[in-house]
Image (cartoon, rainbow, N blue to C red):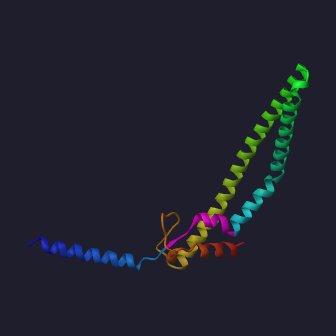
C-alpha cells in the first residue's frame, strides 16, 4: 500500500517535467556557417588576406627561384666544375633554409593573427546570440550538436544581426 502513493508522485513529477520541457524554447547556431558567412567573419578574412598578401607573394617568388635554381643545378651539374657545383649547391641550400624559415614564420604569424580575428568575431557572435536569446526568450541556445532540426536553427537570424551591426 505504501508504494502506490510514491508511484503516483513519481508519475506526477514526470508529467510536470515533460510539460516544462515542452514549454522550453531551444535554439541552435551553426558556428561553422557563422564563421564563413557572417559579415564580421568575411571582413576579418579580407583583412588577413590583405595583411599577409605581400609576404605570401614573396614566399611564392622565393619558391619559384628555388625551383629554377634546382632545375638549373640538375641540368648543368654534369658539365660544371666541382667547385662551381659545390658553390651553387651551398647557395641553393642556404636559400632553401631561408625559405623554410620564412615559410614557418609566415604560418606562425598568420595563425596568430587568424586566432586574434577569430576571437573577435566569436565575441561579437556570442554577444549577438545572447541578445537574440534574451529578446526572443530562449531557454537555451546550442552551438555544437550532432543533429539540430532546421526548426530550431537560428543561424540566419544571427548572421543577419551581425551583418546589420557595425
Task: Answer above or below: position of 134 versus 108.
Answer: below
Q: Quick one: 26 or 130, which is closer to the camera?
A: 26
> Looking at the figure, which quarter contains the C terminus?
bottom right
The quadrant where residue 123 appears: bottom right
Residue 10 position, x and y percent, is: 22, 72
Task: Answer above or below: position of 40 versus 63.
Answer: below
The mark total stands at 0
The quadrant where residue 8 appears: bottom left
Q: Quick one: 76 or 134, which is closer to the camera?
A: 76
Is 145 left or right of 34, judged from the image as shown?
A: left
Residue 83 falls within the magenta-colored stretch: no
Task: Answer above or below: position of 13 versus 46.
Answer: below
Please identify the residue farthest to the top as the structure is shown: 82
- What's the magenta region? 27-38
Residue 33 position, x and y percent, is: 61, 66
Point 59% across, 66% down: residue: 126
Task: Answer above or below: position of 94 versus 63.
Answer: above
Point 82% across, 42% down: residue: 63
Please identify the residue farthest to the left as the structure is shown: 1
> Looking at the figure, which quarter contains the N terminus?
bottom left
Is 110 left or right of 135, judged from the image as shown?
A: right
Residue 57 position, x and y percent, is: 84, 49
Residue 43 position, x and y percent, is: 74, 65
Residue 29 falls within the magenta-colored stretch: yes
Is 142 left or right of 120, judged from the image as shown?
A: left
Point 48% across, 67% down: residue: 147
Point 62% across, 62% down: residue: 122
Amino acid at each position: 500500500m505504501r508504494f502506490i502513493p510514491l508511484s503516483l508522485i513519481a508519475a506526477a513529477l514526470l508529467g510536470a517535467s515533460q510539460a516544462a520541457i515542452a514549454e522550453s524554447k531551444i535554439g541552435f547556431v551553426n558556428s561553422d556557417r557563422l564563421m564563413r558567412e557572417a559579415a564580421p567573419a568575411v571582413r576579418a578574412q579580407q583583412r588577413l588576406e590583405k595583411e599577409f598578401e605581400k609576404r605570401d607573394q614573396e614566399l611564392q617568388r622565393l619558391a619559384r627561384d628555388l625551383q629554377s635554381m634546382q632545375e638549373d643545378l640538375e641540368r648543368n651539374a654534369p658539365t660544371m666544375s666541382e667547385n662551381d657545383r659545390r658553390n651553387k649547391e651551398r647557395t641553393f641550400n642556404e636559400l632553401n633554409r631561408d625559405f623554410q624559415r620564412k615559410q614557418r614564420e609566415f604560418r606562425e604569424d598568420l595563425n596568430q593573427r587568424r586566432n586574434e580575428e577569430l576571437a573577435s568575431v566569436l565575441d561579437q557572435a556570442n554577444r549577438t546570440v545572447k541578445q537574440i536569446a534574451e529578446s526572443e526568450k530562449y531557454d537555451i541556445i546550442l552551438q555544437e550538436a550532432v543533429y539540430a532540426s532546421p526548426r530550431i536553427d537560428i543561424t540566419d537570424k544571427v548572421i543577419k544581426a551581425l551583418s546589420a551591426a557595425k
